[in-house]
Image (cartoon, grey):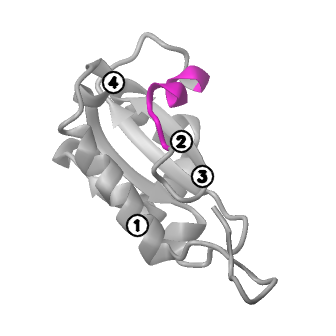
Amino acid sequence: MPVRSLNSSIMKWPNRHQVHTAISQWVRQLGTASGTAASTVLSAGYFGSYARDDAGVGSDLDVVIIVTESNLPFNHRYNLWDFSTIPVPVEAQVYTVHEWEQLPTQQPRFYKTLVEETCWIKQTAAHS
């Protein structure tokens, strides 16, 4: 989150390197975490302003996660994970393998953006 300098009214926002380090550590911990949510992650990365390196004060981190399967509706999957170690707000898109495979035909522009921009931290070959 933003940090105010002791001698200034200027707010500092975490830069790309700080956010990349935090999300990389978060993804690495998925492999050591227990529970079904952690064990089903096939790929994880980030896209958007931090991936393009044009984030500014107030930017959030757009995360994409591909899991083997999920019984939860798309808009509830985000709640499976605790993103509190990431120093900026996180907006996560969590897709099952089947949904990811359908994305090029269902949302071609968004899929193209994901393919071109995503900085993958963890990636299985089948989901590149």
Q: Quadrant of residue 40?
A: top left
Of 90 and 53, nearer the camera is: 90
Q: Which residue is mark 4?
A: 37
Q: Would you say the magenta stretch is mainly helix, strand or loop?
A: helix
Residue lying farthest to the top in this orientation: 71
Residue lying farthest to the bottom in this orientation: 7
Check if residue 82 falls in the magenta segment: yes
Question: Within 10 angstroms of label 1, few (less than 14), some, or many (20 or more) residues?
Answer: many
Q: Which mark is on residue 20?
A: 1
The mark nearer the N terminus, 2 or 4, is: 4
What is the spatial separation of the Cα atoms under label 3 and label 2, in whole angstroms?
A: 18 Å
Above or below, comparing residue 106 to residue 118 in the picture: above
What is the spatial separation of the Cα atoms under label 1 and label 2, in whole angstroms?
A: 15 Å
The mark nearer the N terminus, 1 or 3, is: 1
Q: Which mark is on residue 101?
A: none
Above or below, comparing residue 49 to residue 44 in the picture: below
Q: Which residues are magenta?
A: 75-83
SS for dot 2? strand
Indicate the position of residue 64 as horizontal and vertical percent values: 45, 45
The mark nearer the N terminus, 1 or 2, is: 1
Q: Quadrant of residue 66?
A: top left
Residue drawn at x 60%, y 52% as measured from the top left: 109
Q: Which mark is on residue 109?
A: 3
The amino acid type, in three-letter code, at marker 4 is Ala
Q: Which residue is mark 2?
A: 92
